[in-house]
Amino acid sequence: MDMTGEQRIPTGQQAVWEALNDLEVLKACIPGCDSIEKISATEHQVTLTVAVGPVKAKFKGKMHLGDLDPPHSYRIGFEGQGGVAGFAKGEAKVSLAPDGDDTHTLMRYTVHAQVGGKLAQVGSRLIDAAAKKLAGDFFTAFNARVAPVAAEAGAVAAKPAAAVPFWVWAIAAIVTLAAVFFALR
């Protein structure tokens, strides 16, 4: 599966970068996230519980960060296992840029992922629908967390993702195969 897209986030670039590197923020915003643990400066272990159609499982996976250019861009590799439910692996490239007067950030992403096992048997439409829902849930929670005043006032609404956000797609893939994020480094 290949996906590209963008997400407009209602806060400045540095704040987005910092939130994407705050494990507590990510854990709170990723649907079904049980834990995120830092293994090293560029590697994290993630545990998620997710349902995709009739397949519900707990997934364990690792994220590997590379090509770090804070607070502008990075590359993330991911791989995960969900037992009999299947596996997922892939790579995402993400970039952040100020949008407008630096009160918003534009996140752009490109993702390539592979899913196997029972998850692959569910069908791409069901996997895409689950990934889009996870993405929407993630960005709703993330935007409210990084810009709570704007979100409460209803002054700023996030532009819906054109496809599945890189970070959430990684999670959906690690969840949908071992399922997110994104997160940027």
Image: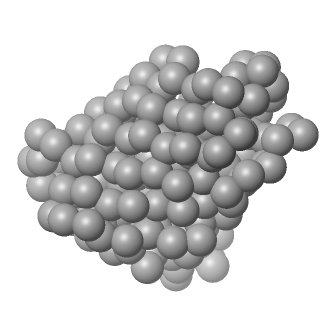
Q: Residue at horizontal 53%, vertical 34%?
A: 88
Q: Quadrant of the C terminus?
A: bottom left
- Which image quarter: residue 45? bottom left
- Which image quarter: residue 91? top left
Relative placement, left or right, of 9 versus 150 is left
Q: Residue at horizontal 59%, vertical 66%?
A: 33
Q: Residue at horizontal 46%, vertical 51%?
A: 61
| Horizontal and vertical percent position of residue 154 | 64, 69
Relative placement, left or right, of 106 versus 65 is right
| Horizontal and vertical percent position of residue 17 | 26, 62
Is 105 above or below relative to 33?
A: above
| Horizontal and vertical percent position of residue 98 | 25, 50
> Depth check: 72 or 75 in front?
75
Q: Residue at horizontal 10%, vertical 47%?
A: 69
Q: How is the image coloured?
A: one colour
Is 50 above or below relative to 25?
A: above
Residue that extends furthest to the right in the rendered view of this protein: 54
| Horizontal and vertical percent position of residue 29 | 56, 68
Is 113 above or below relative to 83?
A: above
Q: Is residue 26 visible in the rendered structure shown here?
A: yes
Is 124 above or below relative to 74?
A: above
Relative placement, left or right, of 96 versus 86 is left
The count of marks equals: 0
> Depth check: 85 or 93 in front?
85
Relative placement, left or right, of 95 versus 31 is left
Q: Is residue 161 visible in the rendered structure shown here?
A: no
Q: Quadrant of the N terminus?
A: top right
